[in-house]
Amino acid sequence: NAGNECVLNGQHHSFHGESSILPWEVTTRSDNLLIMELTIFNSLHLKRALTIDPSLSILRCATEVTNIGLTPQEIVMVEHVAFQGSSTIKVSAPEKSSWVFPKGYEEVGEDEEGKMLWNQSGIDRPDLSSPIKDKFVRLAYLSEGSEGWVSIFDGDRGTGARLMWDVKKFPYLWYWQERFSPGFPFYGRAEITGLEPASCYPDEALNGASKSGRSTIIPVNKKISFDLAVEII
């Protein structure tokens, strides 16, 4: 699951799914490689390999999800990549990419459908490249025009990262900023910028994605895989 908790086919799925709250087992560990594994509901086996490239400043994350149950299993795929919050960050994305503000997160300046092109950021429109200053939370998502990359750079710290992913596996990207929000789940303790490749919309959760056709069904004894990379810039 990703997003709010939900129920699908009688099974309860927690906020962001069981893989975000259950303990993972580290099965392989070396200087440049970490492999973690987890079984959910006695139906899905997850294996994640985190690799640091020995010659480049790149972290790669490869995931396999295998259906070990007796019936087909339905999932959504979202990688919750989060960066330390800052008042001096700048986010970059494809100029012609189209961004949507979900219901409840609307901002002044988008069109009547809640959409905005990245190159329209700024004057008389939300500035998606800069951090929020006068509110607690921002949520928008890249709906069209993805090129499989987005970057973030902190001018004060002089560090940044470029996130890269497969647009066929993750056609969308959730762009979320948390700035000391008093509510769930951090209760005023966090300043975060999330750049999250996703297979569904942020307001769907697994049950909504199932209805919209943006979920993925894994047949019995079959597996799916996906990966992404974060390059320090």
Image (tube, helix red, strand yellow):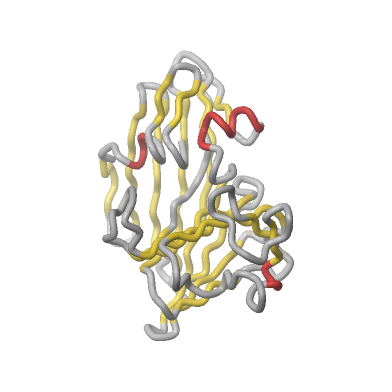
Q: Name the one closer to the observer, 140 or 166.
A: 140
* Side of 208 relative to 48 (left or right): right
Residue at 72% in and 52% down: 113
Quadrant location of residue 69? top left
Q: Visible in this render: residue 56?
A: no
Where is residue 212, by image quadrant?
top right
Relative side of 192 to 176, left or right: left
Which of these two is toward me, 194 or 19? 194
* Number of numbered discs visible in the structure rendering: 0
Q: Residue at x 39, y 38 (%)?
A: 15
- Residue 146 lies, with reference to residue 27, above or below; the image says below
Q: Is residue 169 visible?
A: yes
- Taking 107 as reference, is 157 left or right? left
Foreground pick, 159 / 1: 1
Image spot of residue 214 (x, y percent): 63, 36
Instruction: Tell me what residue is drawn at x 54 percent, y 54 percent.
Output: 105
Residue 64 in the image, given as x and y percentages of width and height = 47, 39
The percent position of residue 12, horizontal first and vertical second, equals: 40, 24
